[in-house]
C-alpha cells in the first residue's frame, strides 16, 4: 500500500521517465541538480539550450528584471538528476520545465527572433561593424562558437563595435 508521504512526494517531484513533457510550471523551481547557469532571453530559449546540453534534463528560468543585480536577470539554470527526478518548490518569478530530449519533433536549434533592447550576456569574443542586426545575426549563425550576439545602434557602440558575438 502506498503511503500518503509517497503520494505527496510523487506529486511534488519532477520526473523525466522517458516521455515527452511540454508543460511549463510557473512559479515552480526544480530544487537541486544544478549543472550550469547561463543567460537566456526567455523560457523557450532556455529550453533549447537545456535540450542541446549533454546532461541537462530539467531547467528553471528566472525572469528577475526587478532585481538590482544584473547578474540575476534572465538566467537559465540547467539541471540533471541521476534518479531523473527533482523536488519542486514554489518560487515567484520562475518557470521550470523539461528538456525536449524525449521530444524529437520539438527540437530546433534555430532561434531567428531578435530581442530589441536586450544585451545578451556571455563572453564577448569577437566584434565587428555590420550594416544591421540581421547581418550581425548571420555572422553569429555562421560561427560555430557564437551562442548569441548583441547589435548596438549607431548612437550606442560597444567598445567601438556594433556587432558583438558571445560564447560561453
Image (cartoon, rainbow, N blue to C red):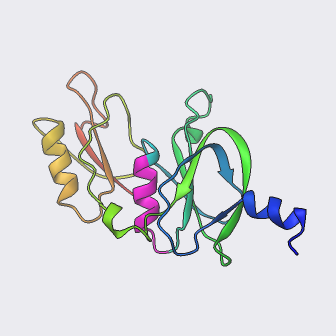
Q: How many marks?
A: 0
Query: At x 86% / y 72%, what residue is drawn?
Result: 2
Q: Quadrant of residue 78?
A: bottom right
Task: In the displayed orientation, state which residue is furthest to the front.
Answer: 1
Task: In the displayed orientation, state which residue is furthest to the bottom.
Answer: 82
Q: Quadrant of residue 51?
A: bottom left
* Along the viewing direction, whichever of 144 and 41 lies nearer the viewer: 41
Q: From the top left corner, tell me how far across and down residue 168 is, in percent.
A: 42, 59
Q: Which residues are magenta?
A: 44-54
* Along the viewing direction, whichever of 126 and 29 lies nearer the viewer: 29
Q: Magenta segment, principal secondary structure?
A: helix
Query: At x 42% / y 41%, what residue is drawn?
Result: 41
Residue 168 visible somewhere in the drawing: no
Q: From the top left corner, tell me how far across and down residue 121 is, in percent.
A: 43, 45
Q: From the top left corner, tell me how far across and down residue 12 is, in percent.
A: 74, 57
Is 78 positioned to the left or the right of 4 in the image? left
Is 111 positioned to the left or the right of 56 in the image? left
Amino acid at each position: 500500500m502506498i503511503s500518503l508521504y509517497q503520494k505527496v512526494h510523487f506529486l511534488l517531484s519532477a520526473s523525466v521517465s522517458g516521455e515527452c513533457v511540454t508543460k511549463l510550471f510557473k512559479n515552480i523551481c526544480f530544487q537541486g541538480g544544478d549543472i550550469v547557469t547561463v543567460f537566456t532571453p526567455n523560457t523557450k530559449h532556455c529550453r533549447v539550450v537545456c535540450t542541446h546540453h549533454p546532461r541537462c534534463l530539467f531547467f528553471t528560468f528566472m525572469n528577475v528584471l526587478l532585481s538590482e543585480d544584473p547578474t540575476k536577470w534572465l538566467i537559465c539554470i540547467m539541471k540533471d538528476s541521476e534518479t531523473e527526478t527533482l523536488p519542486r518548490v514554489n518560487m515567484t518569478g520562475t518557470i521550470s520545465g523539461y528538456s525536449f530530449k524525449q521530444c524529437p519533433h520539438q527540437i530546433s536549434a534555430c532561434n531567428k527572433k531578435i530581442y530589441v533592447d536586450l544585451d545578451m550576456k556571455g563572453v564577448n569574443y569577437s566584434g565587428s561593424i555590420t550594416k544591421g542586426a540581421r547581418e550581425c545575426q548571420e555572422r553569429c549563425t555562421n560561427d560555430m562558437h557564437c551562442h548569441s550576439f548583441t547589435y548596438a545602434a549607431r548612437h550606442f557602440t560597444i567598445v567601438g563595435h556594433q556587432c558583438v558575438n558571445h560564447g560561453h
